[in-house]
Each structure stands twice: as C-alpha cells, then as structure tokens.
Amino acid sequence: MTESVKGPASYFPSIEKKYGRPIEEWLELVRSSPLTKHMELVTWLKTEHGMGHGHANAVVAHTLAAGK
C-alpha cells in the first residue's frame, strides 16, 4: 500500500496545475533568490508571481527544509 504525501509536498500537484509550471521550477526560483527569510520569500512569491499564500508557504517551507 502506498503512503500518502504529507506536509508541504502535498500541495505540489495543485501548485503545478494552478500555476502551470513544474514544482522544480518553483523550488529553483526560491533557491536562486537572494532573499533568505521564510516570510520574505513567501511575500515575494505572492507579489512577483501571483501565488496564493498557502502555496507560497508550502514551496518556501519545503525548499528551506531541504537546505535552500
């Protein structure tokens, strides 16, 4: 039996569908940003890329947890 995805990664399929980019592109955008603080990055994704708060938070949380 397959275990369901939990945490920030559970948002990835809906992020790809809603914003039309593969999740790896979003993760790379965050990794390449000069910003380093969680909420700065969330705000940046929201204002510059039109991402909703929950989706932006999930992308940033996953990226930072993996060691930006």
Image (cartoon, rainbow, N blue to C red):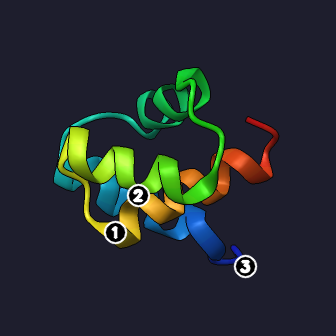
**Nearer the N terminus, badge 3 or badge 1?**
3
For the residues marked 1 and 2, what is the alpha-carbon distance in whole angstroms?
5 Å
Residue linked to disc 2: 56
> What is the three-letter code of the residue carrying label 3?
Met
Residue 5 seen in render:
no
> Compared with residue 8, is residue 45 higher up or lower down, i.e. above or below?
above
Q: Which mark is residue 1?
A: 3
- Quarter containing the N terminus: bottom right
Local crowd size for mark 1, using a 10 Å CA cut-off: few (<14), some (14–19), many (≥20)? few
Local crowd size for mark 2, using a 10 Å CA cut-off: few (<14), some (14–19), many (≥20)? many
> Does residue 5 appear left or right of residue 19 in this picture?
right
> What is the three-letter code of the residue carrying label 2?
Ala
At mark 3, the secondary structure is loop
Residue 46 seen in render:
yes
> Compared with residue 41, is residue 55 higher up or lower down, i.e. above or below?
below
> What is the three-letter code of the residue carrying label 1?
His
Residue nearer the viewer, 48 or 31: 48
Q: Quadrant of residue 13?
A: bottom left
Residue linked to disc 1: 53
